[in-house]
Image (cartoon, rainbow, N blue to C red):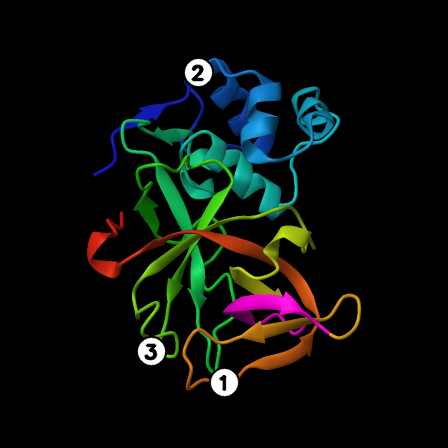
Amino acid sequence: MHNAAQWGNLPLMQKTFRDAFLAAIKSSGKSMRQVAQDAGVSYEQLKNLAQGKSKSTNVDDAVRIAASFGTNLESFLEGQMISTEHPTIAIAGKVGAGAQVPVFDAYPKGAGPQVECPPGLTPHNIVAVEVEGDSMEPVYSAGDLLFYRRNGHDSVPSDIIGHRCVCEDLDGMGWVKQVKAGDEPGQFHLISLNPGANNMWNVQLRWAARVQLHWPADLAKKI
């Protein structure tokens, strides 16, 4: 059961995302610059929202803004904030490494399960995915959670080379692989963690992010 605090005297469901944002700012005492930094969104975007030049934002940024206040999008729009005593991180979906790989965002935006933030991580701008199947054994097992930091839209930073990464290809399929440079610029070799699984050569990626933390299934505290 969440320890939640109401943001002001607004109705249960906000009329606009802007209403929820202004109420959260007022109740939390956070500055818009701090929210922009925590959520990884533009300060100008938040300023336009606060000034009424826009009443909403794209769904991905809305999820990040809600997470910067320690809650998911659904609770944010209801005017509720999860207590920061037990901050949470959203589980974006499931991911595999075999031939049949689930796509990301298996859950409706903001409506997926949450997991307590592991020690050593901050909940801002961090996402988790759940491992499905046994194609990543013995490194990762079914039900394990992998935490990663999204580096922005359509971003494949140079520091991913040689590391285990969560990534998405141009077909919208999610993978967890060791990423190596491909034969041509913009191409990557995806090396399977399981020696018996197939590697992928010269793949183009929509985005990739290094795995920040691996949490075995029996340690994860889903909420």
The residue under label 1 is 99
Q: Nearer the viewer, residue 85 or 211?
A: 211
Label 3 is placed on what type of residue?
A: Asp
Helix, strand, or loop for circle 3?
A: loop
Q: Nearer the viewer, residue 186 or 18?
A: 186
Q: Give the Cα distance between marks 3 and 2.
A: 45 Å
Q: Label 3 crowding class (10 Å Cα cut-off): few <14, some 14-19, many 20+? A: some
Q: Are marks 1 and 2 in contact (CB under 8 Å)?
A: no
**Whole-percent x, y for residue 171 in the image:** 65, 74
The answer to which image quadrant residue 27 occupies is: top left
- Specify the label residue 134 is tagged with: 3
Q: Earlier in the sequence, mark 1 or mark 3?
A: 1
Q: Is residue 172 magenta?
A: yes
Q: Give the Cα distance between marks 1 and 2.
A: 48 Å
- Of the two numbered discs 1 and 2 in the rendering, the one whose residue sits closer to the viewer: 1
Which residue sits at x=51%, y=64%? 104
Viewer can see residue 157: no
* Quarter of the figure that contains the N terminus: top left
- Of the two numbered discs 3 and 2 in the rendering, the one whose residue sits closer to the viewer: 3
| Image: 27 above or below 152 | above
Magenta part of the chain: 169-182
Label 1 is placed on what type of residue?
A: Ala
Label 2 is placed on what type of residue?
A: Ser
**Whole-percent x, y for residue 17 in the image:** 57, 34
**Whole-percent x, y for residue 170 in the image:** 68, 70
The residue under label 2 is 27
Q: Label 1 crowding class (10 Å Cα cut-off): few <14, some 14-19, many 20+? A: few
Helix, strand, or loop for circle 2?
A: helix
| Image: 13 above or below 131 | above
Q: Earlier in the sequence, mark 3 or mark 2?
A: 2
Which residue sits at x=68%, y=75%? 203
Viewer can see residue 196: yes
